[in-house]
Image: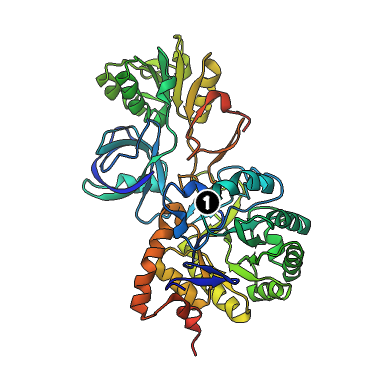
Amino acid sequence: MKQSVFTVIENTPVTERVSRLRLRGDCSAIERPGQFVNIALPGLFLRRPFSVSDWNDDSLTLHYELVGKGTELLRSMQKGEKLDLLTGLGNGFDLSLAGERPLLVGGGSGVSPLLGLARRLVQQGSRPQVILGFDTREDIFLVDELFHLSLSPSVTTADGSFGIRGLATDAMDLPHSFFYACGPEAMLRAVAQKSPVSGQLSFDARMGCGFGACMGCTKETLNGPRRVCRDGPVFLKEELTWDD
Amino acid sequence: MGRLSVSLCGVELSNPIIPASGTFGYGHEFAGYYDLDCLGALALKGTTLAPRFGNPTPRIAEAPAGMLNAVGLQNPGVDGVIENELPKLAAVFHKPAIANVSGFSIEEYAAVCRKLDPRPEIGWLEVNVSCPNVHGGGMSFGTDPAAAAAVTRAVKAVTKKPVILKLSPNVTDIVAVARACEDAGADGLSLINTVLALRIDWKTRRPILANTTGGLSGPAIFPLALRMVWQVSQAVSIPVIGLGGVSSAEDAAEMLLAGAAAVQVGAANLVDPYACPKIIRALPGVLDRMGADNIREIIGGAHGD
């Protein structure tokens, strides 16, 4: 974890509800795709956690969905404005588990961290299969960035307005060695049930601190209570209980 | 004694700043962020006799200048703390820590304290009679002077360590509870715990917290905490640890001026993991601006004469 100040270099809506935020600053604490940053916003007490889409040494990209006061404030941030970030939070995805033919499944704004994950999987020589699920055509984002990695993501829409009609899980028909998933909990559960192999799933939670201090985002697992912010947000399929 | 050192129940602290219970886990996990030995002491996560998962989530909500929590005393139980947490803490923190004890009966408070009493890592027992987020325990003992006194007596009977009662602000007369604890043998008091509060999601029309209510902390409660520290420190002769919304060295100075012998920092740790070392580093400059030679001379200084 590292605390440092970042500068807004781009803050652009990519759909009606999702914006891309690019920030310049020290990214040395980010080690894995699927980790998140916690952003202090003027006038709010608690920081707001956002999954990192992609990053390099001195800049990072987030895709955030408008859900409330914090994200509305974030949407008003202009190029050149400064933000205080905690970076390198959470465990992130483990690339060593990918195997020959990993599958990446994202739903809604949860597709965000799959970009950085896909890039690093490609860099280590594997060709991941990617499925992105959205409600409707207007919600689709991140597809172009994945094309730039020479990947051809399957896109599903619940209303059939683009790509395959149905849910992300409806496109899970090819064999895969391991899966990585991020999205709504119902999607995560469906992916874990449908896939015959092991996988890692990234969870969303209402957090207090984001670094393991407050026990605000605890999740029950087969290994006992775990903090989504510090022990997660990525959990292995085999340690999850879907009781709640 | 150093310029910042203070005394808490006869034990010298190198400075008055202590991370508050529930905002710092069991301490050892934060050794990677900074050298914990810079702290005056640290207060461990509230501990009960049996392990507890705590309340369902969401447990956290934003508030103006603060936050609500309803964690509900998640902890691995006192045996788990002794077996796993205290040895890890001892490896990275070389001063006595404050154990924070909770319970659902007077017998449970005493049982947890009896187990912690022989532990060399623990310098003080902070007895939490003020958790607003559990039913049938915690705060129900701290809102009745007679019950708070009964817990104090039961704990004092099983330990030689200094016993500090952590008081609830959710009372009409905190001075009455404080006096009852002092009369029952408490060696110190810490105040305030969080203030019982509520947030509603206007979009879903339901409370945000799964527990419905939670405890408000952060700068929003600082003036309320300061007023209570002021009142209680005048009414009792045992040391008072001031806490509630302290976020800066200036806030800490206000707490000391109100009569606190030491200061805990809670919610500020959750938004700035380096809050405590920053406050400690800033204290000498605040003393300079006050024209004070050392920090002890400002304790209670706002009361005049």
Residue A17 placement, left or right of A82? right
Instruction: Say if residue A224 shows up in the picture.
Output: yes
Which image quadrant for residue A106? top left
Question: Mark 1, chain letter?
Answer: B
Secondary structure beneath disc 1? loop
Number of labels in the image equals 1
Question: Furthest residue to the right?
Answer: B107
| Image height of A188 relative to A125, above or below | below
Instruction: Say if residue A140 shows up in the picture.
Output: no
- Identity of the amino acid at label 1? Gly
Task: Give how far across and how far down residue A56 sits, in percent.
Answer: 26, 33
Question: Furthest residue to the bottom?
Answer: B305
Q: Residue at 30% of width from left, 16% of height from top?
A: A151
Which image quadrant for residue A33? top left
Q: Residue at 50% of width from left, 72% of height from top?
A: B6
Reading the image, the residue beneath label 1 is: B27
Residue A148 placement, left or right of B296? left
Q: Residue at 56% of width from left, 73% of height from top?
A: B228
Q: Residue at 37% of width from left, 31% of height from top?
A: A32
Residue A30 placement, left or right of A7? right
Q: Nearer the viewer, residue A184 or A225?
A: A225
Task: Give how far across and how far down residue A107 sits, in percent.
Answer: 43, 26
Task: Give how far across and how far down residue A2 sits, in percent.
Answer: 36, 45
Which image quadrant for residue B192? bottom right
Q: Nearer the viewer, residue A19 or B180?
A: B180
Around disc 1, counting alpha carbons within 10 Å, would you say few (fewer than 14), some (14 to 19), or many (20 or more)? many
Task: Give how far across and how far down residue B272 sits, in percent.
Answer: 41, 54
| Image height of B130 relative to B289, above or below | above
